[in-house]
Amino acid sequence: MKKSWIVHIVLIGLSILCGGCWDQTELKEVALCVAMSIEQTPDQQFLLSFQVINPGSIVEGQQGGGGGTSSVTTYKSTGVSVAEASRKVTMQLSRKMLFSHMSVIVIDSEIAKQGIKKIFDVFLRDHEMRMQTNVIISRDVPASKLLKLVTTMERIPANQLSQQLILVEKLWGETHHIQIDEVIRQLAHHGKELTVGGVSIAGDQDKLDKRDNTDTIQPASTLITKGIAIFDGDKLWSWLDQEKARGYLWTQKTMKRTALRTDCKGQKDGLTIDINREKSSLRVIKRNNRYVLHVHIQTSGSIRELGKCSNERLENAFLLKLEKQVGKQIQDEIENTLIALQQQKLDAFGFGASIDRMDRKEWRRIEDQWPELFRTAERDVRVEMSIGNTGMTINPTQVE
């Protein structure tokens, strides 16, 4: 009898401890926000746009959702703070906004020039915010327009916005993707300036939010990646484009592949090399009371297209010469980018962070002077390039 009472007491205690989810929320009670843009109004308030999934519109296997309706809806809200604007948007909704599924935040370039630290403060404090949310800067177009664009490849435009940035960085270069947690880390550390990828819109912006934008073979408006934003502290300062953007990415271990055009027997850009593997290292040494910025790149590739050099036979002597030529080209891209950033006193490469990792005491001693020390530092860029294969043939194409 005594054992029976003990069992009953234990069961009652467990039932109290295992009472279920006291704060559970049903799916039908929430609005899933997948993207947010942040701008500023003329009276210095925050203007937020939210891309929200339309319930029931996303049907597996149907492009653009079901029932002929848009897969997403965009809502706008203003406020003195980001937190206030995100609360005020509920005046337009019948469901609670949920941010845990958000994939991208778009920051307008104009507000980025004024500083973004106050924006990320609210993201750091919000327990619902995913730290793995991608961050991008809108360039030459208001940030809210990127959320209005009807896309062709993805039913949810926010997915294309974030995935396109990651894909371009890996397979082409010239842009850069970053997430909230990394933005906050770089803002808190003075050894590396913040870099964020830029996105814009190509084509007719008047038709970007129309369904017929996706009903033609050639859309009137498309998303395009556009350079890398360089920050001074938390303020947008300048942009890296094309070869200079790629010159930066050579050192960041994020670009997996790219294509390089190079000259061939007097023919400018006569041949194309497909880069398919790349390793990099950065370090700083002190020599004769001056700092030296060392960059070491190991990369390999294959001949993708002979182009204007289609009659060239790919023998060992030619390939060895080509390896040196392409290596020098990569070296020039890196040095040109490094020179441009040294002139601006902006260490976006992370040489300061390298000193901090190797010698914390030394970094603390020179941290305040590092922008000027970085500007006057010597450069030592070395590239090891190898051409692994020539494709399916070593012979020039024969046309009868």
Image: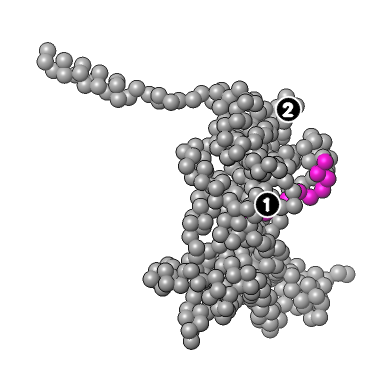
Looking at the image, residue 221 sits to the left or right of residue 93; the answer is right
Q: Nearer the viewer, residue 111 or 288?
A: 111
Q: Pick out the residue farthest to the left.
A: 2
Residue 269: image quadrant is bottom right
Whether label 2 touches label 1, CB < 8 Å:
no
Q: What's the amino acid at mark 1?
A: Ser
Residue 84: image quadrant is top right
Q: Secondary structure at mark 2?
A: loop
The prevailing secondary structure element of the residues shown in magenta is strand
Q: Which residue is mark 1?
A: 109
Q: Secondary structure at mark 1?
A: helix
Q: Can the viewer see residue 369 in this picture?
A: yes
Q: How is the image coloured?
A: one colour
Which span is picked out in magenta? 196-206
Q: Position of residue 202 (x, y in %)?
A: 79, 50
Q: What's the amino acid at mark 2?
A: Thr
Tag count: 2
Residue at the location (47% across, 81% down)?
286
Residue 10: image quadrant is top left
Q: Which residue is mark 2?
A: 69
What distance separates the C-alpha of mark 2 from that of mark 1?
Answer: 32 Å
Q: Pick out the residue farthest to the right.
A: 400
Q: Nearer the viewer, residue 115 or 205?
A: 115
Q: Position of residue 346 (x, y in %)?
A: 59, 67
